[in-house]
Image: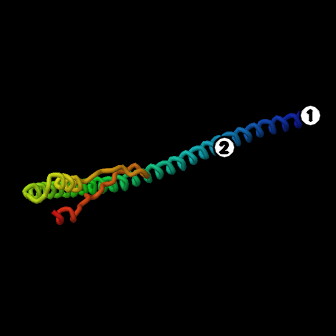
């Protein structure tokens, strides 16, 4: 009987070692699949974020190009306005310089009021263009 009991304990010991070995291998395989699944999910999330950033950059690039185009158009219009203003100022100078009834001081006062002055805005530090000071009574009085 002792022989049979020892044989039974030996078999239990052998089967339990097989059982724990199989459980250990299955645990390691399960852990590997969990790690792989988390890595795959993180990789998909990262690819989604990268695609979102790329789409945002494409939209921003379009917006930037539109802003640059509008800036170029505004600069062209400003140059046209500046050229027109300079031509108008030159025309006034020629016209008023030939007017004999206008004194030199009145002419200088009129021309000083005709030029555009750029003054700093104290609240925002931005430049403001002041329109010319035209004194119509001055030319009509002379």
What residue lies at 66% left-to-right and 40% top-to-bottom? 25
Mark 2 sits on what residue? 26
Q: Is residue 68 left or right of residue 25?
A: left
N-terminal label among 1 and 2? 1
The residue nearer to you, when weighing 136 against 30, is 136
Which residue, as the protein is rendered here, is positioned at the far right? Answer: 1
**Image quadrant where one finds the N terminus:** top right
User: Residue 96: where, in percent of width, then height?
Assistant: 11, 57
x, y (%) of residue 19?
74, 41
Residue 41 in picture, x, y percent from top left: 54, 50
Label 2: state its secondary structure. helix
Instruction: Determine which quarter of the picture holds residue 89.
Output: bottom left
| Crowd around label 1: few <14 · some 14–19 · many ≥20 (10 Å) | few
Residue at image coords 85%, 38%: 8
Task: Give the quarter of the figure containing the C terminus.
Answer: bottom left
Residue drawn at point x = 41 percent, y = 54 percent: 56
């Amino acid at each position: 009987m002792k022989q049979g009991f020892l044989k039974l304990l030996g078999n239990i010991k052998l089967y339990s070692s097989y059982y724990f070995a199989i459980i250990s291998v299955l645990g390691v395989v399960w852990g590997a699949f969990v790690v792989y699944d988390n890595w795959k999910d993180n990789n998909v999330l990262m690819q989604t974020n990268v695609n979102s950033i790329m789409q945002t950059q494409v939209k921003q690039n379009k917006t930037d190009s539109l802003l640059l185009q509008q800036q170029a158009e505004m600069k062209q219009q400003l140059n046209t306005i500046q050229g027109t203003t300079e031509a108008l100022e030159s025309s006034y100078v020629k016209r008023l310089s030939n007017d004999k009834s206008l004194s030199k001081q009145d002419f200088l006062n009129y021309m000083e009021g005709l030029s555009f002055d750029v003054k700093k805005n104290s609240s925002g530090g931005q430049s403001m263009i002041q329109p010319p000071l035209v004194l119509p009574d001055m030319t009509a009085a002379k």
